[in-house]
Amino acid sequence: MRSIEVKGSARTIAERSSEQARALKEIRNNGGVPCVLYGGDEIVHFTVSAEGLRNLVFTPHIYVVDLTIDNKTVKAIMKDIQFHPVKDNVLHVDFLQIDDIKPIVMEVPVQMEGLAEGVKAGGKLVLQSRKLKVKALYTAIPEKLIVNVAHLGLGKTVKVGELSYEGLELLNAKDAVVCAVKLTRAARGAAAAAGK
């Protein structure tokens, strides 16, 4: 898995909710994003510049984050993110501190590999699940989950239960479809003509 550096500065939480809301608004107006780090000895509230999160948020890749908050660096993953419903800018990010001994749950992108038999016969290959949820030590999580589709015939699917990866536990439902070769109108016509 790739790594990326993110720098932030700790912030204190106001006791009254009205003061808290005002403080969060001020952070966002100044180009910052309020963040929270879970999973360590204590919960840490901090602020990161919106620009400092750009390469982590707007990417198809998954990252281990070298997160530095006021000169203290920990390894973390981005766990949750909230966007503004209209402007689409980042409102809040939750990070989870990770280590070498505790498994984590993370969504990993799926990449299909090979030319499916069904595509050669005129079908259309469709990726139904762009990401799969895995549980593993962060050191064992790959950047992508490769699914070989060369054997897939017309109308056939690959389900989560048919996949296995060393050191990873797949958490999606076993009968969830990952990818499928759909029958196109042309393929149906060819199949009907062959059947005559």
Image (cartoon, rainbow, N blue to C red):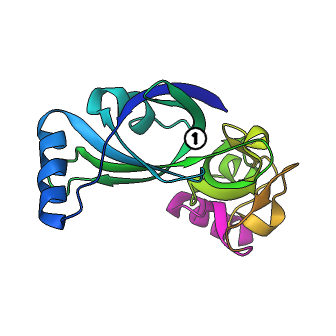
All told, the count of numbered labels is: 1
Q: Is residue 64 above or below residue 15?
A: above
Q: Residues within 10 Å of mark 1 (few under 14, many from 20)?
A: many
Question: Where is 5 relative to 170, above or below?
Answer: above
Residue 179 x %, y %:
64, 58
Could you say which is closer to the camera, residue 108 or residue 94? 94
What residue appears at the point 11 percent right and 53 percent down from the top-left corner? 22
Residue most extreme to the right = 166
Q: Which quarter of the figure has residue 56?
A: top left
Quarter holding the C terminus? bottom right
The residue that appears at 49% across and 38% down in the rendered structure is: 60
**Front one among 184 and 62:** 62
Q: Of residues 98 and 193, which is closer to you in this image? A: 98
The one nearer the camera, 177 or 190, is 177
Q: Quadrant of the N terminus?
A: top right
Q: Position of residue 145 (x, y in %)?
A: 71, 45
Residue 6 percent coordinates (x, y): 45, 28
Three-letter amino acid code at disc 1?
Ala
Apparent side of residue 27 relative to residue 172 in the rendered image (left or right): left
Disc 1 is placed on an element classified as strand
Q: Can residue 105 be spotted in the picture?
A: yes
Q: Quadrant of residue 77?
A: top right
Q: Residue 52: where, in percent of width, then height? A: 35, 27
Give the residue at x 70% y 57%: 134
Per the rendered image, the range of residues in magenta is 174-196
Q: Magenta span has 178?
A: yes
Identified at 79% across, 42% down, the residue is 140
Is residue 126 visible in the rendered structure shown here?
no
Q: Which residue is mark 1?
A: 76
Q: Is residue 142 magenta?
A: no
Residue furthest front in the image: 15
Looking at the image, residue 44 sits to the left or right of residue 50; the answer is right
